[in-house]
Amino acid sequence: MKWLYEKALARAKEHNIEGVTYKLTQGVVKNIIPAIASTNALVSAVCVNEALKLATNISGSLQNYMMYMGDDGLYAHTFEYQKKDECPACGTKPFSVKVPATTELKAFVDILREDSRFQLKNPSIRCNGKNVLMQSPPQLKELTKPNLDKQLKDLFASGSSLDVTDPVLNSVAISIEVNLE
């Protein structure tokens, strides 16, 4: 505890933080460490319980939601959330976009940004495993930047499926089928 207090005090002095005392450090550790340990134990227990239910088929599995209420017990929803096929995040149906074949990639990116189905801000595009337009890292952005002035017909064929990612979508990619006219 003394070592932890000394480290906290050194950091506090380095960043001009006042009020770090041995008693405060002790209080923080006593409140946080048990909470982390009990939370980890609870999550582990639920995972093992769900694995047992799946492996032995002794009960239905948890459906999407569980809330631990401390002394009051556990609450779990009994309904399954429905999936929309046209949802950009969880849907399986590819979106379809019709554009003239002579549209430049930069105009196509603007079309994607303005389309209310996607609500994209800074999309990256891949087609058939090739980078068409990447927004990050900076090296890939520079390599794909020349494509912005190219026409779509020069980048991919009509009916191609594009994998589009965007910071708005977190780590999810949406699939867009491009039909060139």
Image: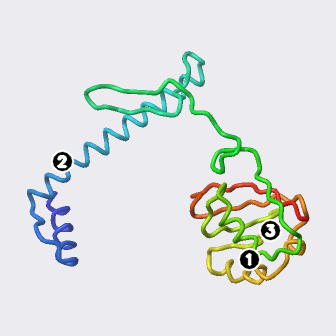
> Which residue is under mark 3?
130
Per the image, label 3 sits on a secondary structure element best described as strand
Comes first in the chain, label 3 or label 1: 1
Residue that appears at 48% across and 30% down: 48
> Which residue is under mark 1?
106
Give the CA distance from mark 2 to mark 3.
52 Å
Residue 93, by quadrant, is top right
Closest to the camera, between mark 2 and mark 3, is 3
Amino acid under disc 1: Lys
**Crowd rating for badge 1 (residues with CA inside 10 Å; few <14, some 14–19, many 20+):** some
Q: Quadrant of the N terminus?
A: bottom left
| Residues tagged 1 and 2 counted as in contact (Cβ below 8 A) | no
**Crowd rating for badge 3 (residues with CA inside 10 Å; few <14, some 14–19, many 20+):** few
Per the image, label 1 sits on a secondary structure element best described as helix
Closest to the camera, between mark 3 and mark 1, is 1
Per the image, label 2 sits on a secondary structure element best described as helix
Give the CA distance from mark 3 to mark 1.
17 Å
Location of residue 130 in the rendering, given as x and y in whole percent from the top left corner: 80, 68
Extreme residue toward the top, this view: 58
133 left or right of 42 in image? right
- In front of the other: 8 or 147: 147
> Which residue is under mark 2?
30
| Residues tagged 2 and 3 counted as in contact (Cβ below 8 A) | no
